[in-house]
Image (cartoon, rainbow, N blue to C red):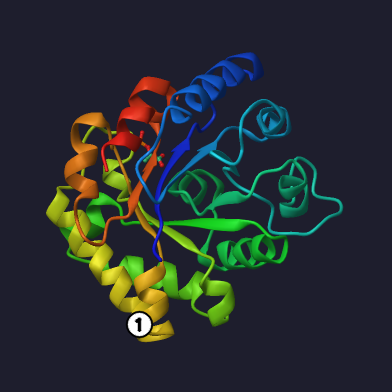
Amino acid sequence: MRKNIVAGNWKMNKTLEEGIKLAEAVDKLVSQGTPENTDVIIAPPFIHLAELAKRIDTGKVKLSAQNCAAEAAGAYTGEVSPAMVRSTGAEYVIIGHSERRQYYGETDAILKKKTELALENDLTPIFCCGEVLEERNAKQHFEVVKTQISDALFLLSEEEFGKIIIAYEPVWAIGTGVTATPEQAQEMHAYIRSLVNKRYGKQIAEDITILYGGSCKPSNAGELFSNPDVDGGLIGGASLKADDFYAIIRSF
Ligand code: PEP
């Protein structure tokens, strides 16, 4: 059965001490209850993961990395491998966030390698896709998302693909305060599901969780999540305040 998920991407925010406070606050709120069939994930910086795994109930608030290396091990100074991420207790990894694509030159070919290595190391990829404003204005958004998904993911086996979470994040909506309308989100999510249906069949398309990301906040989450193909959100700014993040979780 398809899962609803709310995942918080902290990006490059919070010292370890601040991160512990925020994670413990989220943990406390989540222990008061969450909607049925809804998983909660937080993605702090790498250096927080092992410590947070000891301090929060990871059965209720699961941990994700924001990125991982495309190589398994070796002379790659500054990189963190999927095996290292998994060894902290994290179960998920965000792959292909638009900031990684834009500032660090991550291509679909690199993201394909990262996704395969993450799966090999028992991590669930949260694979991000989405168009920039010029592409939407030129009505190329469907084509852009199709290429991102098919180039990075569609060579996976059925079993592997069945583990993927997709996050549709229109780049023009990330951190801008401009949110996609519920209709724009639903239209793209339905399109993504139709691509999955064509490649992997009806059951896998029905079961895959597709998150929306981009200026999602307590005031608009309910309307976005009420769409049939929107299964939750990848939340940036609003995940840095425990009360706002919890309000988003509760808005299913
Ligand atoms: C994100 O970076 O994944 C994101 C959705 O950011 P924000 O919610 O701040 O737009």
The percent coordinates of residue 185 (x first, y second) are: 21, 55
Q: Can residue 141 be seen in this view?
A: no
Figure check: 190 above or below 89: below
Residue at 58%, 21% in the rendered image:
19
The percent coordinates of residue 199 (x first, y second) are: 41, 84
Q: What residue type is labelled 1?
A: Lys
Residue under numbered circle 1: 202
The percent coordinates of residue 33 (x first, y second) are: 41, 33
Please state which of residues 247 and 106 is positioned toward the viewer in this rendering: 247
* Label 1: element kind: helix
Residue at 15%, 50% in the rendered image:
182
Q: Quadrant of residue 176?
A: top left
Q: Is residue 24 visible?
A: yes
Residue at 69%, 64% in the rendered image:
117
**Disc 1: residue Cβ within 8 A of ligand 1's nearest atom:** no
Q: In this view, does 203 lie to the left or right of 11?
A: left
Look at the image and tell me in which quarter the N terminus lies.
bottom left
Q: Quadrant of residue 51?
A: top right
Q: Is residue 201 left or right of residue 28?
A: left
Residue count near mark 1 (Cα–Cα under 10 Å), binned few <14, some 14–19, many ≥20: few
Q: Is residue 74 left or right of residue 166?
A: right
Q: How many labels, in total?
A: 1
The percent coordinates of residue 235 (x first, y second) are: 38, 38
Figure check: 27 above or below 153: above
